[in-house]
Amino acid sequence: MIKERRSTRSSAVFNPGMESFMQNTEYVSPEFARQLILDELFDLSLYKRFREISGPELHPTLDELIKVESGHLGFWQELFNVEISELNFARRLKLEMIVLVCRLFGAPAIDLILEAIEVYGIRKYLTLWKQNKDNPMGKAVQGILKDEFEHEDVIVGRLKDRIINPDRIRNIFLGLNDGMVEILGAVAGFFASFGQNALVLLAGLTTAVAGSLSMAAGAYVAVSSENEVRRTQEEKARFLEGGTGEEPRTEPAIRSAAIVGVSYFIGASFPLLPVIFGAHTALWSILTAGTIIILVSMALAFLSGMDVKRRALTNLVIITVAAGVTYLIGMMVRNLLGIEI
């Protein structure tokens, strides 16, 4: 059951060290305080927009999230004596992009984004607490951390009948990412070795098909093994409970294999598109795949609660290294081994 959230003013009474912190804020820079408040304002604004575009089945959950987030916003504004009522341009743009996606895909997208925001919020507050647990700031955030765990985690967890599986969506993005990175590297190496569009296309398609089948087979084996372990554990639990309890639940291995294989092949197709349309160098494949990889990285980072910039930068480094190394290998094969096509 959801507990009634304490008001902002009562939080100072129930949270040890709160009053001393409110009188001594040298632990927090004005810019940090502003960013923290803007984060809460963004979440609150997003929940309100979700309520406007969602169906009545999500309204009770969103109403409670709005209530909790309003308390969070008031908490930080009173704590830092700073009131912000409007989002900055970057956050407004992010808000509108998320709302657009949710308008297009409906309740499944809202469900997934709510989980992503929950993960991000918990990680943010845990990091803040760990960095300041030995000073008044750490004591001050204890109350809102408990609020994050006890309220938002339970509220979002009420979405029992999920239209989509968040783990499955993350696997799709990971498959897309793997396919793009691996085939981009292959295309770069093939261009360096062969230098002919038709041969690069043939080799690239062959590699993409082989890679997607390999990924699908790997996913099938992994899920099958996981299902066996889960089935054994649940049957053991049912035996110890005297035959009562739920029937073992497993993820269909064939469906998981198909999702991974197809998503990999779709990702692999992006570096091949410029080749299909007649590109004679790896440059266009790098530009095309690089752009898509950045977008996929941003989506994957958001869904996983990771730092978006760090994830995008990591993938840019990976594709740069992959394309560079495979291109050099292709040049070595062509020049040092005397292959002429």
Image (cartoon, rainbow, N blue to C red):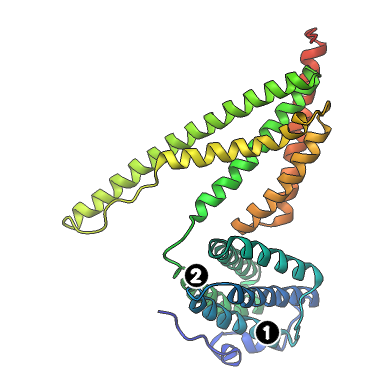
Q: Nearer the viewer, residue 22 or 77?
A: 77
Q: Residue at x 76, y 29 (%)?
A: 275
Q: Position of residue 91 (x, y in %)?
A: 75, 69
SS assignment at label 1:
helix
Mark 2 surroundings within 10 Å by alpha-carbon count, few (fewer than 14), some (14 through 19), many (20 or more):
some
Q: Classify 297 as above or below 47.
A: above
Q: Position of residue 319 (x, y in %)?
A: 74, 37
**Residue 339 shows in the view:** yes
Q: Quadrant of residue 13?
A: bottom right
Q: Position of residue 34 (x, y in %)?
A: 76, 77
Q: Which residue is mark 2?
A: 156
Task: Tell me, for residue 40, which label it has, or none.
Answer: none
The quadrant in which the N terminus is found is: bottom left
Q: Classify 3 as above or below 13.
A: above
Q: Amino acid at mark 2?
A: Val
Q: Single out the mark in the foreground, 1 or 2.
A: 2
SS assignment at label 2:
helix
Q: Quadrant of residue 32?
A: bottom right
Q: Amino acid at mark 1?
A: Phe
Q: Position of residue 264 (x, y in %)?
A: 59, 37
Name the side, left or right, on which 299 lies relative to 169. Answer: right
Q: Residue furthest left?
A: 242
Q: Which residue is mark 1?
A: 21
Q: Residue at x 60, y 44 (%)?
A: 174
